[in-house]
């Protein structure tokens, strides 16, 4: 496994991981109408824009293939909810075939220093991810939001 910062030329590979993990994780949670517009092509365009504008996710590669992505940064207000930590994990996705291999852990440690204070938002109905974050010292903070831009997906805040 190799970790490195993504470049603009990685947009399609990063989008593929992001989209595939969303389909795998939320395919049965989010309604079909959501998936009509949440396409790989749209995700690729979004990542092209983000990377061109300075986003710097870390990617995990195995045999030259991007199999995971993670990104953190300064914590921001979300849905009128003020941050409670200075750092925020914005995303961490690993293809299902690589779950349990340590790639998720390596990505988390690469973007949020082990043991450091941070916050994240995780889908309420994603127990696997919540357990992963709990193993890494994050606890439920009690704040819950409903993301109306993502078919009313409920998210809860975890902090460390």
Image: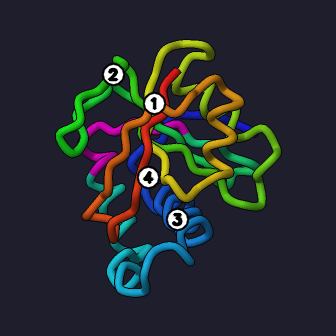
Residue position marked by numbered label 4 in the rendering:
9
- SS at badge 4: helix
What is the quadrant of residue 49 in the picture? bottom left
What is the quadrant of residue 4 in the picture? top right
Find out whether the residues at labels 4 and 3 contact each other: C-beta distance under 8 Å: no
- SS at badge 1: strand
Describe the colour scheme in one phrase: rainbow
Few, some or many residues within 10 Å of mark 4 (<14, 14–19, 20+): few
Compute the Cα span from label 2 to label 3: 26 Å
Compute the Cα span from label 1 to label 3: 24 Å
Boundaries of the magenta span = 50-58
Few, some or many residues within 10 Å of mark 1 (<14, 14–19, 20+): few
Residue 6 versus residue 89: which sits nearer the camera?
89
Residue 84 is marked as 2
What is the quadrant of residue 135 in the picture? top right
Few, some or many residues within 10 Å of mark 2 (<14, 14–19, 20+): some
Q: Say which residue appears at 31% left-offset and 60% top-offset.
A: 46
Residue position marked by numbered label 1 in the rendering:
141
Residue 22 is marked as 3
Viewer-nearest of labels 2 and 4?
2
The mark that comes first in sequence, 1 or 4, is: 4
Return the residue found at the far top.
116
């Amino acid at each position: 496994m190799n970790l490195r910062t993504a470049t603009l030329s990685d947009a399609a590979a990063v989008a593929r991981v992001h989209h595939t993990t969303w389909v795998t994780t939320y395919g049965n949670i989010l309604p079909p109408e959501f998936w009509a517009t949440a396409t790989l092509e749209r995700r690729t365009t979004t990542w092209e824009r983000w990377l061109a504008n300075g986003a710097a996710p870390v990617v995990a590669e195995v045999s030259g293939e991007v199999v995971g992505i993670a990104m953190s940064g300064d914590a921001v207000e979300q849905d009128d909810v003020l941050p409670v930590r200075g750092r925020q994990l914005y995303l961490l996705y690993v293809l299902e075939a690589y779950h349990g291999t340590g790639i998720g852990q390596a990505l988390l440690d690469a973007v949020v220093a082990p043991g450091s204070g941070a916050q994240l938002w995780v889908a309420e109905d994603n127990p696997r991810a919540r357990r992963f974050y709990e193993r890494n010292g994050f606890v439920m903070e009690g704040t819950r939001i409903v993301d109306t831009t993502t078919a009313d997906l409920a998210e809860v805040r975890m902090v460390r």
